Amino acid sequence: MTLDLTSRRDGVRSGASNGAVGLSALAGASPAMLLVSLTAAALVAAPLVSLFALALKGDAEIWPHLAAHVLPNALAQTAGLVVGTALVAGVLGSMAAWIVTSFAFYGRAVLLWLLPLPLAIPTYIAAYIYVDIFEVDGPLQAPLRALFSWHTPQDYWFPQVRSLGGAIFVFGVVLYPYVYLAVRAMLQTQPAALSEAARALGATPTRLLRQITLPLARPALAVGIALVSLESLNDIGASEYLGVQTLTLSVFTTWLNRSSLPGASQIALVMLVAVTALIALERYGRRRQAYVRNGSDSVAERIPLTGWRAGLAAFACLVPAALGFLLPAGFLMRETLTRGLLIGFEPELFDHALTTVTLAAAATVLVLLLAGSATLLLRQRPHPLLRAGLAVSALGYAVPGTVLALGLLAPLVLVDRGLGAVMHWITGALAGLIIIGSGAALVIAYAARFMAIGGGFLQAGLARVPGELDDAARLFGAPPLALTRSIHLPLIRPALWGAALLVFVDCLKELPATLMLRPLNVETLSTYVYQFATRGSFEDGALAALLIVAAGLVPVVCIVRQADLAVGARRSR
Amino acid sequence: MPPHPFRTTLLAAAAVAVAASSVTSSATSPAYAQPANAGEVNLYSYRENRLIRPLLDAFTKDTGIKVNVISASSGLEQRIKTEGANSPADVLLTVDIGRLQDAVNTGISQPIVSPALDKAVPPQFRDANHHWYGISMRARVFYVSKERVKDAALTYDELADPKWKGKICVRSGQHIYNNALIAAYIAHYGEAKAEEWLKGVKANLAQKPSGGDREQARDVAAGKCDIGIGNTYYWALMNDKDPSKKAWAEATRVVLPTFKDNGATHINVSGVVLIKTAPNKANAMKLIEWLAGDTAQHMYADVNYEYPVREGIAVNPTIKGYGALKPDPTPMSKIADNKKAAANLVDKVGFDN
């Protein structure tokens, strides 16, 4: 049955055939949607082109040095970090997603909204916290030392958090929600017919998982793991702190210590090409597979668990939630209280929170609008131009945030000059820098950075909608927009919600691009926290870090309710 | 399901965009809409807003000039350069001599012409061509175990001495603080000797470089190593300002190490650059001169735990407790020139691996 399903020729494409390259294939597409779709690509292409221009400015002589002294170690460490993190996050995330979607058990309701929350903890903050917890004078080692009367760290072995292994652990427990949300959105639309048939034939839940659930979830798993990998690849703060020599660090070393911006751009672009090739390879690997949900609209009922099975299910979900969220958040809460941050509450924190939430909301809407249009239009008109555009729009996530922001500078200033000239012509006044001078630059940077999340989630979601539906709608003469509105959008709702949540929370905690592109006097919660961290006392930013969590909590709760209702409305738990 | 999701989304987008611009523009529009506003100065800063806020507030109180700030950790030179003639930037405030030199090399600076500044800032801490002026400084020192290290004086050179095998802790060799220290070592002894030295230091490390400066004190306190390398103010902040880290300070003491060849301690500066296109140049000059003035120099010492560049300004008592500082007279520009070589050496000896 599994084979039958996954080896079928791609059933998604209908209407215009893949081979139609001429622009005529785009005829009839809503011009607004077409424009919006291509804007998504332009938004990401612009900084990459300007980065390419920077890279061409010379300094190619850094390469022999890099090849001899940097790349061997950096490649090994980077590969270790990315693969390790992908494994930890992949296992934790998909297991939790499978459990909460397939089973009903005591505590599930709470876990549903706890599980996405590690998203709201910036990775570098989690790194600081885990170092504090695991260090010699921390709450874990101190009692052990007392118990076994060890005197010096040389007397015993204890895992080092400031190491590659420690970094994999920290990244894994805070990044698993990318996998969790992607896989869960996929499983929620899993056809009941399949699993019910399998169960009727006597398949155990684990066999069901291995032979039906996992193969079906592959596109979502791939999207989630790609996001986790890119996030860990492009991190700088946590890696440096934990002593992992990644390629991204060498981008910064080349730029700042070797004073070679061209050299740094070259490394970043080479990394981008490598990453793109890897992602393309994965896509190629499942090119002949379709993941459509066929026929029945009903979704499998959750199997009620009791006794030790219920306990095990709850435990398997509680572990990632506790490590990724409860523990770090508890640490931040303790620091907030013991440092009297509530009593000394700074009123401007409210302003920073408002700025942060507004910027994040604007960017989330922009991403969903652009990525949504591009994805839905591609479904109607599978034109290579659109496909390429959507692929390009995902590249913003594949370069470090600071590098993307650097690349955005030139295009933004160019647009600002144009706007300024127009304003001058109309009003006669000097306008200055409109986009960079306002929060607009940040909204654009966030959108360029996180478009991949929107596009990835929506494409994975749409892949589940069978082409027969499109054909039926067309048969009845439904115009393209009506098809989008009444068939595609409702069916990809879980993916849409998941993407919205991820993008919003990612924007809340975005740091590198915010630092470089923010206007004068603008502070977000994450830049506010960061200024304490650079001074060596991140704990003093604990309250602001908790405000990021609080701001992220609102959409988490809404979305969990929405998404859970979407599939479970008809039955009791 | 809403009747017109696409249209609703568009409307929502418009609403949020309007809200976003109103939230941020209230804070920013004056500086951008009127580039030459009389009562303001725009500061691009590599120092955290929170750290410099007390200083800037005092400046505003003194002069009535409002200071608008952008602070970042990298890329401000590129931003100013790209913003070009329209850039609102008046002054760039940065730490590290390499960064100051980079800013000048990017071509965004103009000479600062001020006899008052020349009088206040000793020649060693300013650019011969007047493109940057140092404002405050810090030294790169050793946090040593009170219990296990009894030496009163130590040198940077002896970090490579096998007697310290497995006893030294330090953050990444590519961090700008260490980059400048290694560059200074090259400036003293040349690249070949520096490479040998760095290999020796690497061989003496107790663990792979990681963490920040604060963690090195923690590791010494915990007994992982005997000598941690860090900046002067981190230890003082742990000792005076953070009760939860007081134990790390109490288990360690600060030694001001010296270079063997001249008996002086490696220092780095924070400094200012006047931007070529500064729309508020007069106010920018006032701010720069004010930063080298009495009030600011005292604040740098007392609030920020740094060494003032002006002679005759008292340092903070905790910092004073480290002993008398003899700043390395090696020209700062020579340290900046060796920055790239230092970065390459760190890679070559695999210091961070």
Image (cartoon, coloured by chain):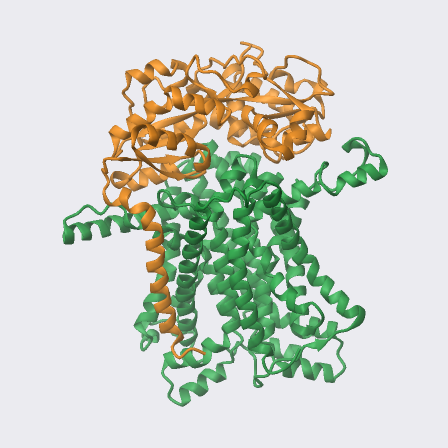
Q: Nearer the viewer, residue B7 or A569?
A: A569
Q: Residue at x 41, y 16 (%)?
A: B310
- Residue A315's x, y, as percent? 73, 62
For residue A249, above or below residue A506: above
Name of the residue lying farthest toward the right = A148
Q: Which chain is assigned green? A: A
Q: Nearer the viewer, residue A365 or A244?
A: A365
Q: Residue at x 40, y 35 (%)?
A: B45
Q: Residue at x 35, y 62 (%)?
A: A39
Quadrant location of the N terminus of chain A? bottom right
Is residue A504 shown left or right of residue A134?
A: left
For residue A364, above or below residue A307: above
Q: Which chain is assigned orange? A: B
- Residue B128's x, y, as percent? 34, 17
For residue A120, above or below residue A28: above
- Residue B104's x, y, as percent? 35, 28
Name of the residue lying farthest toward the bottom = A476
Tell me, yes or no, if residue A83 can be seen here: no
Is residue B249 shown left or right of residue A526?
A: right
Name of the residue lying farthest toward the front = A343
Quadrant location of the C terminus of chain A? bottom right
Tell me, yes or no, if residue A267 can be seen here: yes
Is residue A378 shown left or right of residue A316?
A: left
- Residue B58's x, y, as percent? 38, 29
